[in-house]
Amino acid sequence: MKWYERSFGPDYLALYPHRDDAEAAQDVAYLLALIAPPTDLPLLDLGCGAGRHLLALHRLGFEDLTGIDLSQDLLDAAAERLGAAGAHAIELLRSDMRQIPHQSHFATILSMFTSFGYFDSSDEDARMLAGVHRALLPEGVFVLDTLHRQWTSDHLLPRESRTLGDLQLDITRSLTADGARVEKETRVCEPGRPERVYRESVRMYAPDDLRKMLSDAGFDDVKLYGSLTGDPLDATSRRTIAVARRRA
């Protein structure tokens, strides 16, 4: 199994409790100011996880929402969260992000919280971007929220221990020899249960490389920011936010 087929199971939500509805609502507020997505046209949350951004969008009146994720556990959590809010019309699909089952359909596609760079090769990442381009309407907008390679490399914390309720987490992080990927291993200890080990491996792109990949995929008007609030991308930026438009 690839790491991303195993690491987004039931433990995932417990390991990231701070990624909650309040944070998602703030993210969406920033997105509205940054790109002003139309509320009456289809919007896709690619790598939607447990649906927290979809819920925030629903609460702001977005009428045609779809979420895609590979993890059935997270999709089940999303269905529960959205159902509790009465958002029964939101479509949730289980699919690899390289295989979006739509063409020329969405006015907006979002990829939030580092759902990019998972695959073994940059060619597969490029395939994902090409699929996003195909799934957008002409002049549709794609927002990609990912790691800022230089900041992540400069501030990498090699070891960390945390306690979350009954969970004891021991986390190690490292860079590959070429500096292109950040590798993370989380050991989870819990009374009465065997130790679980989860791994993550994310390819990071320099700004110019990411811009070229988006252009090669067919996107126009590629803009890079250092945050969802539209701050300039510089050495102090923790994130890279790409906003790209499908050619008309």
Image: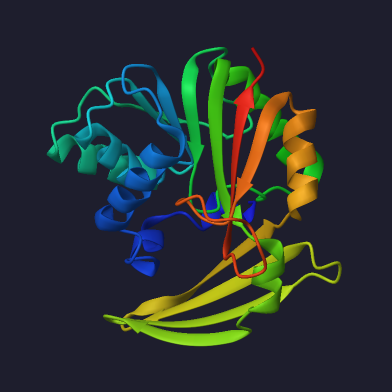
Of all residues shown, which one is farthest toward the front? 232
Please tell me which residue lies in front, 77 or 189: 77
How many marks on residues?
A: 0
- The relative height of residue 225 versus residue 70 in the rendered view (above or below) is below
User: Image quarter for residue 20?
Assistant: bottom left
Determine whether 131 is above or below 237 in the image: above
Colouring of the image: rainbow
Q: Is 218 situated above or below 74? A: above
* Residue 124 appears anywhere in the view: no
Kindly tell me whether residue 8 is visible in this rendering: yes
Relative placement, left or right, of 56 versus 231 is left
- Counting from the top left corner in percent of width and height, residue 38 is at 37, 22
Percent position (x, y) of residue 156?
A: 64, 78
Q: Is 214 left or right of 241, judged from the image as shown?
A: right
Q: Residue at x 46, y 34 (%)?
A: 35
Residue at the spot 33% in from the left edge and 66% down from the top edge: 18
The residue lying at 26 percent from left, 80 percent from top is 165
Q: Residue furthest right?
A: 178
